[in-house]
Image: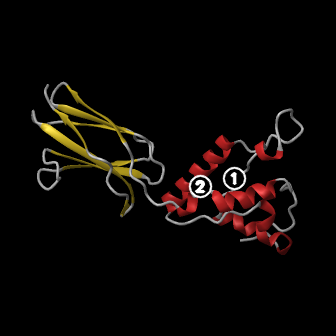
Amino acid sequence: SPANKAVSDYGMSAWSVGIELCHVGTARSGYTRETDYPEAQLQALDHLIAYIDAYFGFESTIIIHKEWRTSNSDTSKEFEPYLANYRNTRTHGKRTLTAPSLSSLSNAKGKKLTVKWKENRTGLGYELQCSTDKSFSTGVKKVKLSGYDTTSTTLSALSKKTYYVRIRTVNGKKHSDWSAVKSVKIKK
């Protein structure tokens, strides 16, 4: 709740997240208005907002500082075109869960299978299936993994057979389509 009527909009701090972007500015050689906010910085912001949205299960509303604290004027006019562009082109709040891509399957000693995939930030974890049946209708091993930054796992107690593997991104009860299926023969 606000401390007093003079600063009533401070109450928003109790239920919002403030993120500050620092830009290079046009005073430095080689930088223009278009490059004040490097793409890497905007990508990092996009990933952070996507993670927050996925974690809490909502779509963020992006506003500038002076939109929530009416007496504040510290948001530069140069930022306004970036914000308008960001709101129109970034996908953080409208992301659908996309399937991760399997990178490799390898047989490790002791009848183990190491599975690796590319990080996928559209969800909060993964579900992996492994089976000797390429249609995944019988004998399916299921593994749930939390953390979008998890990119490998090892399955053990397998037989000397060919195994088929697929993976999908999950966020609570929501999930992406399955990835393309890859196979590996367990020999050792």
Image side of residue 49 versus residue 122, left or right: right
Name the kind of residue labelled 1 in the image. Ile
Q: In the rendered structure, which disc, 2 or 1, sits on the residue that comes first in sequence?
A: 1
- Give how far across and how far down residue 77 sits, in percent: 86, 56
Quarter occupied by the C terminus: top left
Instruction: Name the residue at 16% across, 50% down.
Output: 140
Tell me whether circle 2 and circle 1 mark residues in contact (CB < 8 Å): yes
The residue drawn where x is 56% and y is 66% is 59
Q: Which mark is residue 19?
A: 1
Question: Residue visible at 33% across and 49% down?
Answer: 179
Q: Count neighbours of disc 1 (C-alpha within 10 A) and say few if under 14, some if 14 to 19, many if 20 or more.
A: few
Write down the residue under mark 2.
49
Q: Find residue 50 and report its horizontal and vertical position in percent.
A: 55, 55
Question: Which numbered mark, 2 or 1, is in the foreground of this view?
Answer: 2
Q: Residue at x 69, y 56 (%)?
A: 18
Q: Secondary structure at mark 2?
A: helix
Asked whether, in this view, residue 35 is left or right of residue 113, the answer is right
Kindly identify the amino acid type of the residue bearing the numbered disc 2: Ile
Residue that sits furthest to the right in the current view: 27
* Disc 2 crowd, CA 10 A, few/some/many (<14, 14-19, 20+): many
Depth check: 2 or 46 in front?
A: 46
| Residue 55, disc | none
Rendered image quadrant of residue 111? top left
